[in-house]
Image (cartoon, helix red, strand yellow):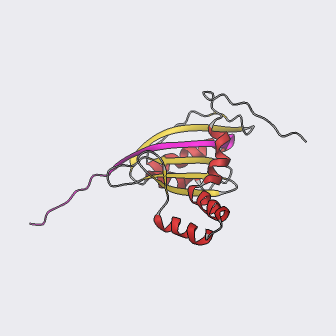
Amino acid sequence: MAETVVRAARAAQGVLFVHSSPRALCPHVEWAAGTALGTAVNFEWQQQPVLRGSMRAEFTWQGEAGSGAKLASALRGWEQLRFEVSEDPSPGSDGARWMHTPDLGVFFAQTDAAGNTVIPEDRVRYAMEIGGHDARELHRELRLALGQAWDDELEPFRHASDFAPVVWLHQVG
């Protein structure tokens, strides 16, 4: 008699941060996220003070392992969005993080149990090869591998919630 193996879907969880979305796009973002997760979702939208006329939302999600990738894929088609998706590590699955900005597109990184970005050995070796003995070039390559440009662009949006008072300085001249 053949043994039947039934595998339960591995549970995963994470957070979707929509840092900025045009107001008209908000219902479509919810629909896309719900479709990716296989269940209807409702976000609590708030004004995004960094970008006038845009909205922001945070949503904690649960689903099968790999749902973070599905969320990021579902949202990457709208270039007006700034978002981050995180998926916590789960048994048999590494953690992951996706960041998207209109100017830079999508960045993906594996994460460890503490949420730190993990740079694969081959990527470090590539940075060393490209950088050679030029410390500035090595530094540039490692910043690229860490997604530093995405972090730099998203940082003002991350701190723009009601719970993180920020003083906005505008360039003059």
- Residue 130 image point, x, y percent: 61, 71
For the image shown, how many numbered marks are present on the structure?
A: 0
Which quadrant of the figure has residue 138? bottom right
Quarter of the picture containing the N terminus is: bottom left
In the rendering, at what x and y percent does residue 35 appear?
A: 49, 50
Image coords of residue 73 (percent x, y)? 53, 56
Residue furthest right as drawn: 173
Residue 14 vertical placement versus 168 (above, below):
below
Near-viewer residue (44 or 109): 109
What residue do we see at 66% from left, 43% from top?
Answer: 21
What's the magenta region? 1-24
Name the residue: 56% across, 68% down. Answer: 128
Does the magenta-highlighted stretch encompass residue 109? no
Q: Quadrant of the C terminus?
A: top right
Residue at 47%, 62% in the rendered image: 120
Residue 19 in the image: above or below residue 118: above
Query: Does the magenta run of residues contain 5?
Result: yes
- Residue at position x 43%, y 44% in the image: 114
Reply above or below: 58 against 92. Answer: above
